[in-house]
Amino acid sequence: MKNANEKSAIIVEDLRHSYVMGGRRLEILRGANCRIMKGKWICILGASGCGKTTLLNLIGGLEKPESGSISVCGVDVSKLSRNGAAHFRSDTIGFVFQSYHLLPELDILENVALAARIAGAGRRDAVKRARELLLKVGLGERLDHRPTELSGGEQQRAAIARALINDPQVLLADEPTGNLDAENGSEVLDLFDRIREMRPELTILMITHNRDITPRADGVLLLKDGVLTPQN
C-alpha cells in the first residue's frame, strides 16, 4: 500500500511568510499547513487581502517562503533555484490567473502554443496541441482572434487551455471567475468540471472569496489569520 506522501500532490508544512510595508512587518502566513491529495479539487476561501494569492505563489514557486516547506508532486519547491523553479512550473504546474495574462499582440492560438514552445515543444506540435485544446474549450472559431477581440469568459477559457497544454499534474487557479459576470463565471466552472472528467489525475487548487463555488470542490480550506482550517 502506498504511503500518504505518495498519494499527496501538495504538502504544506508550517509555512510562514511576511512582507515589510511602510516600515512595518505584516505577517501573512503564520504556520499554514495542508495536505492535498492527487486528483482532488480543493478550494481555499478567504477574505480579500488575507494572503490567498501569496500562498498560491509560494506553492507555485513564484516566491520563496521565510520558513516551512512546500512539496509539490514530491519536490520541495522552496529549495529550487529560480531557473529550477521555472522548469518545474513548466513541466508540472499550470496557472490560471484572474486577469488572464494573455499577450495582446498574439492571437489566441499563438498565446496557447507559446507555453508549449517555451517548454521545448516544436512549433508544429505546439500549434497542433493548442488547436486541439482550444477546440475542447469551445474556441475553435476564435483561433485567429486576439485577446481584445474576445469576451472575458472567452479569454479565461483560452487561459485555461494555455495552462493545460503541457499536461500539468497540478492546476493552480487564482480567482478564475473574479473578473467575470455570473453567467460567464458559471461557464468557466463548468469547464473545470469537464477538465476533471478528461484528466481525473489532475489536482486543482483554486483560491476564491466566493462561497458559491465551493460545492463543486472536493474540499474547502479557510485561510484566516495566516493559518489554514478545513471547512465542512
Image (cartoon, rainbow, N blue to C red):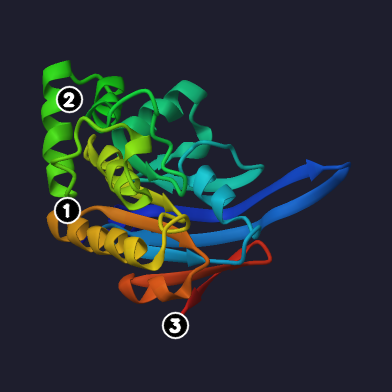
- Place residue 63 in its image quadrant: top right
Name the residue at 18% across, 33% down: 130
| Picture quarter with the C terminus | bottom left
Q: Secondary structure at mark 3?
A: loop
Name the residue at 54% across, 55% down: 13
- Do the CB atoms of the residues marked 2 and 1 lie less than 8 Å apart? no
The amino acid pointed to by label 3 is Asn
- Do the CB atoms of the residues marked 1 and 3 lie less than 8 Å apart? no
Name the residue at 79% across, 42% down: 20
- Place residue 228 in its image quadrant: bottom right
- Judging by the rendered image, the residue that carries numbered circle 1 is 199
Instruction: Classify residue 102 as left or right of residue 157.
Output: right
Placement of 3 over or under 166, stated as above or below: below
- Judging by the rendered image, the residue that carries numbered circle 2 is 126
Percent coordinates x, y for residue 187 in the rendering: 27, 62
Could you tell me how far apart the alpha carbons at marks 2 and 1 are, in whole angstroms? 19 Å
